Amino acid sequence: MMQGQLILGWVVLGLLVGLAARFVLPGRTPGGAVVTMLVGIAGALLGGFLAGAAGVRIDNVWERYGLAALGAVVLIALYRIMVARRTR
């Protein structure tokens, strides 16, 4: 798979994870749906790039997408924790 297609897949996956987070995570999300989806995209890109930079050898494209989804979920959770602490 070409690198551009992989990155586009991470962006779409991050968007979907961000959108899903709006429905799955309870309570009000700081910043709204757009910010949550943007954080999801950033997390997916970060997770995908960090896996490659760390030398994680992944032969299956679905495993790469799994790591990108994990990055998106982690970044969304961190974002919610940081913003919740700031608003208290």
Image (spheres, grey):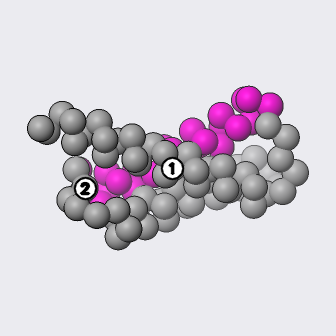
Mark 1 or mark 2: name the one nearer the start of the chain.
2
> Going by the image, does 88 lie left or right of 43?
left
According to the picture, the residue beneath numbered tag 2 turns out to be 29
Q: Residues within 10 Å of mark 2 (few under 14, many from 20)?
A: some
Is 34 left or right of 84, judged from the image as shown? right
Q: Is residue 5 above or below residue 48?
A: below
Residue that extends furthest to the top in the rendered view of this protein: 54
What amino acid is at disc 1? Ala
Does the magenta portion include 54? yes
The outermost residue toward the bottom is 23
Residue at 75% from the left image edge and 47% from the top image edge: 3
Query: Residue 72 — which label?
Result: 1
As shown in the figure, which amino acid type bears the numbered disc 2?
Thr
Residue 25 falls left or right of residue 61: left
Q: Is residue 72 visible?
A: yes
Residues shaded magenta: 31-55
- Image location (x, y in percent) of residue 73: 49, 52
> Is residue 41 something one can see in this rendering?
no
Q: Is residue 38 left or right of residue 14?
A: left
**The C terminus lies in which quarter of the figure?**
top left
